[in-house]
Amino acid sequence: MNFLRQAWAVAAKDLRSEVRSKETVNASLSFALVILLLFSFAFDPDAEQVRQISGGLLWLVFAFAGTLILNRSFARELVNDCLDALIASPATGAQIFFGKCVANYTLLVAVECVCLPIFAVFYNVKLPQRIALLFLVMLLGTWGITVIGTLFSAMTVNLRLRELMLPTLIYPMLIPALIGAIQLSTVLLGNDPLGTENQIWFRLLVVFDLIFTALALTLVEIVLVG
């Protein structure tokens, strides 16, 4: 219980900071909308091929926009040596990391919820009747992005080229989760039946999230303290 209280204190601090400044969400949302707009000109929204790659386009936007939020996760703590003060606080490395994950996850899901209906309008895609399943896929896939992105954000926070290093490091790690999320999203956006052959992707997302959450919570103390 104490673990969750400390983690929530870190998450609440980050969320309050973002609500006041709105710099990260505004940048991420603007970037996502620009990508959606550019892709809408590149593809014919009425073409059947677009519906077949709709899941890939959607998660491409989510992954690109997400790195902007994740990159700022620990970078905002560099001002006035706040990161050193945070590490020296009573909260453990795992609590700090989990609190950062919760804050990043909340911001990412908020951006995705804004982007999804805009994506549907730009690409003439009808939101599926099973919107709850699509939202579940978004939640599972986004948690995988958040956990890995937050961990590598801590690892690259002191690098001068962290804006370039972070996506270079996390995208290869995210391939299994992105493949599963893309496959499921494409089926759901196309209103196709979700057969038993696609249910394995749900299990992949759940296992991916559990494994990397456990690994990150175990390794983050070494990453932060050394």
Image (tube, rainbow, N blue to C red):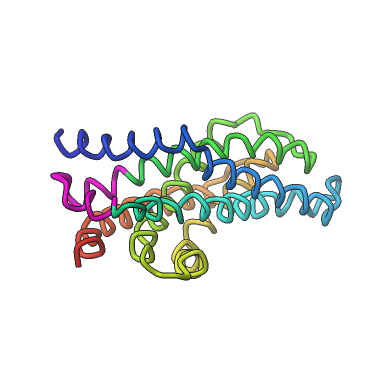
Which residue occupies the foreground of this view, 114 or 212?
114
- On screen, residue 152 versus residue 20, left or right, reads left
The image quarter in which residue 103 lies: top left
- Residue 186 position in % (x across, y down): 65, 48
- Residue 85 position in % (x across, y down): 22, 50
Q: Is residue 203 above or below residue 120?
A: below
- Residue 158 position in % (x across, y down): 36, 66
Q: Which residues are magenta?
A: 82-99
Quarter in which the N terminus is drawn: top left
Magenta stretch holds residue 86: yes
The residue under the point 47% across, 40% down is 139
Quarter in which the C terminus is drawn: bottom left
Magenta stretch holds residue 84: yes
The residue under the point 23% across, 49% down is 86
- Residue 14 position in % (x across, y down): 37, 40
Q: Is residue 143 above or below residue 130?
A: below
